[in-house]
Image (cartoon, grey):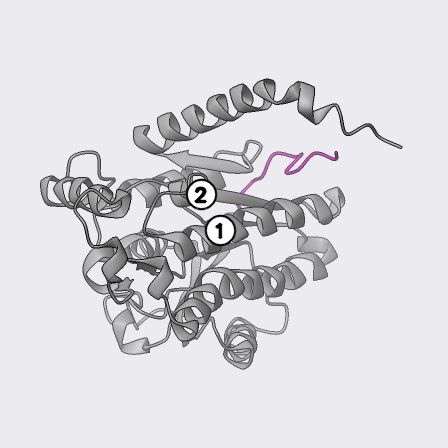
Amino acid sequence: MNSVNTNPYNLPSDAVLMLPRPIVTGCSSGIGREIASLIASKPNLRLIATARDISSLSYLPDDTSNVFKVELNVTSVDSIDAAFVAAAKHFGENFYLDVAVNNAGYSLSGDTESATEEEINQEMQTLFFGTARVTMRAIGVMRQHKEHRGGLIFNISSLAGLIGLPGHAYYHAAKFAVEGFSESVAREVHPDWNINICIVEPSGVKTNFEGHSKARTKPHPAYAAKDMPARKLEFYVNMGIKSGVGMLAPSSIADSLFAIADRGERVPLRLPLGPTAWKMGKSKFEGLLGEWDAVKELSFMGKEA
């Protein structure tokens, strides 16, 4: 299996960074706002800030050509294409893109058996297909300039992209899809293109995610009892949200991503963020190795032809 992100990545001093944002929350808060604010505070860097509702970008300055605001709906191919065309027009015919951050998403939680087709499709369109569309459009820009070829794409997954928990099946499905897609594409691009992909896996974040970016399925009576796994998890999750214990500050995530881009070292394919994500992810993989060892004899019964 070929390696990924093989060469050190160096963020150009005049880099252009693009931040596709979620449909539901726009750029008004959370991780995206912190990243955008950090980039906008650096006078040599150029920022393409996107949102479905451009008014949510009012916190960014309007008096500099280094910050370009554009509407973008990640569920629409036409909208994505139009945003790239507009950015190219703003920055000139030699437009290039150094870093893209795919942070589009909202959680669909609740009783999976009651999820509607519309809820399922919207979740997958936003979290997975939106990320995939912008990723491939960004790669097309990053590889086309031989004198400025290369770039870095951060695809924001989650601890939910590593571990499946009750009551969030389609959210997990979308994040697992982002992980598999990102790993495959990272192995597909030619090493000479110097295009790097980093799958970011934060645990809980102190944002308005729970209040404004969390959709719920209709409760199903078969899952209503307090001893149901999803109800137990909800209880502990709500306790954690209220207390804030173990939750990551959005600014710390922004700082981590910028450090990865700016440190001049090899980009990791996966970046668990926070002690909770690191510990739970490590435990999951260690447990998986144990499960594989337990079925080794059965596995080897399937002899290769």
Sequence order check, earlier mark of 2 and 1: 1
Locate the N terminus and report the quarter of the image it occupies.
Answer: top right
| Residue 259 quadrant | top left
What is the x, y in percent for residue 185? 66, 50
**Numbered marks: total:** 2
Quadrant hosting residue 68: bottom left
Boundaries of the magenta span: 1-11
Extreme residue in the front direction: 222
The secondary structure making up most of the magenta span is loop
Above or below residue 118? Residue 287 is: above
Which label was assigned to residue 200? 2
Depicted 95 relative to depicted 304: above or below? below
Which residue is identified by label 1?
155
**Mark 1: amino acid:** Asn
* For residue 189, side relative to residue 35 (left or right): right
Looking at the image, residue 135 sits to the left or right of residue 169; the answer is right
Q: Residue at x 36, y 33 (%)?
A: 277
Q: Residue at x 58, y 32 (%)?
A: 266
The quarter of the displayed image where residue 292 is located: top right
Viewer-proximal residue, 186 or 235? Answer: 235
Would you say the residues marked 2 and 1 are in contact, meaning their CB atoms lie under 8 Å apart?
Answer: yes
Disc number for residue 101:
none
Residue at 49%, 51% (x, y): give it: 155
Q: Judging from the image, what secondary structure is the residue with disc 2 in?
A: strand
Q: Does the segment drawn in magenta span residue 5?
A: yes
**Residue 217 at x, y percent in the picture:** 29, 65
Q: Is residue 122 rendered to the left or right of residue 254?
A: right
Q: Quadrant of the C terminus?
A: top right
Q: Residue at (67%, 45%) from the top-left corner?
A: 194
**Residue 174 image position (x, y, % from top left):** 47, 56
